[in-house]
Structures are given as C-alpha cells and as structure tokens.
Amino acid sequence: MANHPSAEKRSRQNEKRRARNAAFRSRVHKAERKLRQFIQSKDATASKEVLPKTLSEIMHAVTKGVVHHKTASRKISRLSRAVHKLSSANS
C-alpha cells in the first residue's frame, strides 16, 4: 500500500484510469460483437448500417489511448473486409 502522499495520489489516478479504460474497452467489444452477429447471420444491410458506428467506437478508443492504433487498424480492416465481402456476395 502507498505510504507517501504522491504515491497515494498516483494510486487514485491509476484506479480512475483503469475504470475509464475498462469502460472504453467494453464499448468497443460490445460494438464489435453486435457487428459480428450481423455478419454471421448474413444480414448485409444491417451490417453496413452498424459498421460506421463500430469503426467510430474503435477510433475513439485509439484517441483516448485505450487501444493501440495498429490493433485498431487490424480490427477495422478485418471487420470492413467481412462486411464488404458479405455485401458483394449478396449482389
């Protein structure tokens, strides 16, 4: 346990950041899961609608420093490719 005032403050800050990061991560996971469900059910129109919202959540997490930019880029690429593949298959 922290004994010095500066260490106690650092501990409080870390706890706040941990909670904030968990909230951002949770939002990203929920959005991603929702999109993947539409992709699995082969619903091209719904997945096209949800894709921009999901990408926005991912990029917001990057801006806040919760997700690394390369991880986000990989997720965005894979999700976009899956949605476009689904929509081209239905055309």
Image (tube, rainbow, N blue to C red):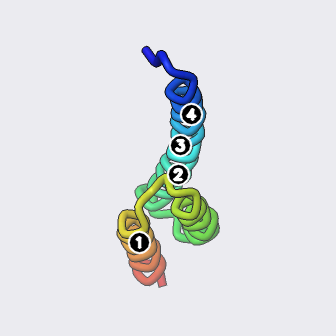
State the CA–CA distance, disc 1 to disc 4.
24 Å
Q: Residue at image x 41%, y 71%?
A: 73
Where does the image place residue 6, in percent across and percent down from the top left? 55, 29
Q: Is mark 3 in CB contact (under 8 Å) with mark 4?
A: yes
Above or below — where is 46 with respect to 86?
above
What kind of element bears circle 3?
A: helix
Visible residue check, residue 82: no
Residue located beneath label 2 in the image: 28
Instruction: Determine the image quadrant of residue 45.
Output: bottom right
- The residue under label 4 is which amino acid type? Ala
What kind of element bears circle 2?
A: helix
State the CA–CA distance, disc 3 to disc 4.
6 Å
In this view, the mark in front (1 or 4) = 4
Residue located beneath label 1 in the image: 73
State the CA–CA distance, disc 3 to disc 2.
11 Å
State the CA–CA distance, disc 3 to disc 1.
19 Å
Residue located beneath label 4 in the image: 19
Total residue callouts: 4
- The residue under label 1 is which amino acid type? Ser
Q: Is mark 2 in CB contact (under 8 Å) with mark 4?
A: no
Looking at the picture, tell me which residue is in the foreground, 23 or 55: 23
- The residue under label 2 is which amino acid type? Val
Q: Residue at image x 53%, y 51%?
A: 28
Instruction: Determine the image quadrant of residue 49.
Output: bottom right
Q: Is mark 1 in CB contact (under 8 Å) with mark 2?
A: no
Q: Is mark 3 in CB contact (under 8 Å) with mark 1?
A: no
Left or right of residue 21, residue 73 in this image: left
On residue 49, the disc is none
Mark 4 or mark 1, which is nearer the start of the sequence?
4
In this view, the mark in front (2 or 4) = 4
On residue 21, the disc is 3
